[in-house]
Amino acid sequence: MEKLEINNLLDLNQTIAQKIFENSKYPWEIIKKIKDFIIELGKSLDKEKFEEIEENIWVAKSASIAKTACIQGPCIIDEEAEIRHSAFIRGNVIIGKKVVVRKFFRIKKYNYI
C-alpha cells in the first residue's frame, strides 16, 4: 500500500490543489472533499488571472476553451490549459496548467514479450 500513498504518487508542488491533500494518506480519501474545496479555492483565485465564467466555474484568462466544449461546475481551469472542440468536463474537476482536454482519449494496453 505504500506505493499508493499520495507522497509517492503526486508532486504536490505542481498543483494549485495542495491543501486538499493535507491530512490524507491516500488519494481516494479526498474524493468527498473535492466539490467544497473547488468552490472555496475558486473564490480565492487571483482575479487578475482568473474569471468566474459561470457559477462555480473559474477559468484562467490564459486558457483556451472551444465554443463547443461543455463544462459543468464546480470546476477550475488553470493557466494555459486548452479545452478543445466537443470536450466534456463534468463537475468537481481541476484542470491543471497547460493540460489539453480533447474529445476522445484512448488508453491502450501494450503487452511486451
Image (spheres, rainbow, N blue to C red):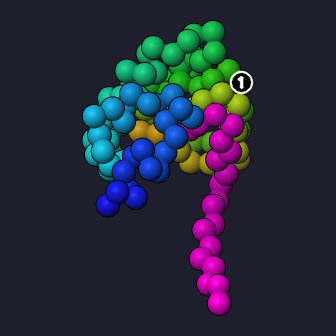
> Quarter of the image containing the N terminus?
bottom left
Q: Magenta stretch? A: 95-113
Residue 15 x %, y %:
53, 33
Drawn side of residue 94 relative to residue 96, left or right = left
Instruction: Identify the main secondary structure in magenta.
Output: loop
Q: Position of residue 30 (x, y in %)?
A: 32, 41
Q: Amino acid at mark 1?
A: Ser
Q: Residue at x 52, y 40 (%)?
A: 11
Check the image and name the residue furthest to the bottom.
Answer: 113
The one nearer the camera, 11 or 48, is 11
Count every numbered label the image shows and give the total.
1
Q: Nearer the viewer, residue 70 or 11?
A: 11
Regarding residue 11, the answer to whether it shows in the image is: yes
Towards the viewer: 47 or 26: 26
Asked if residue 86 is among those painted magenta in the image, a careful observer would answer no
Quadrant assignment, res 96: top right
Residue that carries the numbered disc 1 in the rendered image:
62
Q: In which quadrant is the C terminus drawn?
A: bottom right
Question: Which residue does the image show at 30% across and 45% down from the upper left?
Answer: 25
Quadrant of residue 29 within the rendered picture: top left
Find residue 14 and report its horizontal and vertical position in percent.
Answer: 57, 34
Which residue is pictured at 56% across the width and 12% down the height? 46
Q: Is residue 13 left or right of residue 40?
A: right
Q: Position of residue 95 (x, y in %)?
A: 56, 38
Any part of residue 35 in sight:
no
Is residue 108 located in the magenta-colored stretch of the structure? yes
What element does badge 1 sit on? loop
Taking the spot 36% from the left edge, 51% from the top edge, the residue there is 5
Q: Is residue 95 left or right of residue 6?
A: right
